[in-house]
Image (spheres, helix red, strand yellow):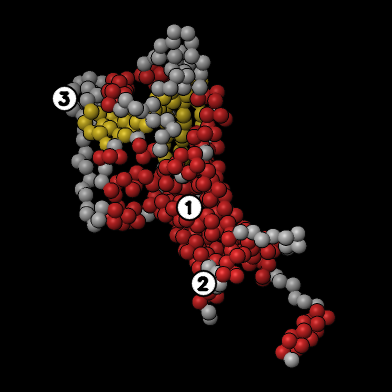
Amino acid sequence: MPFKQLIGKIHLWLGLTSGLVVFILGLTGCLYAFIDEIKPIVYKDRLFVEVPPLAQRLPVAVLKENAQKALGDKFPVQVAEVYLKTGRTVSFRSLKVNPEATLYGNYMEYYYRVYVNPYTGKVVKVENTKWEFFNVVVTIHLNLLLGPVLGKQIVAWSVVIFVLLLISGIILWWPKNKAAAKQRFSFKWKDTTKWKRKNYDLHNILGFYAISILLIISLTGLIWCFESFSQSVQWVANAGKTYDAPAAVSSDTTDIRAFSLDKVLREAVHQHPQATTFFIPVPKDNKSAASVFARKDGAPLFRSTRSQHDQHSARMLTRTSFATMNNGEKIVTLNYDLHVGSIAGLPGKTLAFFASLIAASLPLTGFYIWWGRKNKKQPSQRKRVENKRKMEGIEA
């Protein structure tokens, strides 16, 4: 069997095996690409409030108390999301998962977000985030709503197959000569061009132009899917050097002062003056350090900073930024922004959007190519006779 014919067979069966999952991943990737731009529009009523004249922001502890009352004691608040931008609500999360469950409904036992007016303390919205549209979209993208035990494995190996499809696809696309190349870079359609030819060109030409971006999206996805792959990438980035994990830090248990969100927030704002949004998980016990994730709205995620504070005194214990990381850690930190295109701002997200759209189309156009060849109409008896006479004339 000729080499390209063998690659074609492999490409076909890999595509038929993973096509449905690739279609779902591509489509959900499109829907999630502009989430930061879409949410403020569709959720304006819960994300923004009118600012009263001479308004003063209430303590975060008061807002947290009101959020907890709205949820009830059954759903303890675990994370505070504080936005310093004028007119933005402060939100609080309550989340519980069952990591052994195989269906999303059982895996995500509950997930709520409570949005609170920072000037009046009024609860604006109690959101059942478990079934919120964008959260469901990203969960389908991560594990097909099947939970991390089963769904993550299906997604992970489908992405591996997709990488092989991209590599085999470029081998099949590669033209034999300059004449053949003319049809591989642009659409040469005429009024008489049949749909089968158009579909073939959509599969080959769009796939060719999207392949570099799709490889980046796929490989960054694999870093999340396989810990061994992530460790290997970090090892290569660090030139074969292995770094020990940083020593864990804890709060001073001899300090009897209670944990204060406001005290930790004030210190975090002081330590991260460029940040506009702060994520502060509530410590699980009186020994755990208070972690703070600080980012500037609109900036790529890798530019965010992380710090840990003594939960009693708010004294900063550690501070981590992109500049302080080793090369392996930098690769992992860049992973999200590379995956969604935000590393290049809005143009990067746009490229990721169209690449994901093309990824979703490839299983459809590829299946139609296979189906068309499998069910190719046989020429009539009269046509076969005419073709035979033509061939005999050529041989003569």
Which mark's residue is nearer the viewer, 2 or 3?
Answer: 2
Which is more N-terminal, label 3 or label 2? 2
Q: Position of residue 381 (x, y in %)?
A: 81, 81
The residue that label 3 is drawn on is 254
The answer to whether mark 1 and mark 2 are in CB contact below 8 A is no
Question: Quick one: which residue is furthest to the bottom in this view?
Answer: 396
Secondary structure under tag 3 reads loop
Q: Residue at x 61, y 59 (%)?
A: 186
Question: Quick one: which residue is furthest to the front in this view?
Answer: 178
Q: Residue at x 34, y 53 (%)?
A: 230
Q: Residue at x 45, y 19 (%)?
A: 86
Residue type, mark 3 in image: Thr
Label 1 crowd bin: few (<14), some (14–19), many (20+), radius 10 Å: some
Q: Position of residue 317 (x, y in %)?
A: 21, 31
> Residue 7, which numbered label?
2
The answer to whether mark 2 and mark 3 are in CB contact below 8 A is no
Q: Position of residue 61 (x, y in %)?
A: 36, 19
Question: Quick one: which residue is furthest to the top in this view?
Answer: 54
Residue type, mark 1 in image: Ile
Report whether 347 appears left or right of 275. Answer: right
Report whether 248 appears left or right of 170. Answer: left
Which mark's residue is nearer the viewer, 1 or 2?
Answer: 1
Secondary structure under tag 2 reads helix
The residue that label 1 is drawn on is 213
Which is more N-terminal, label 3 or label 1? 1
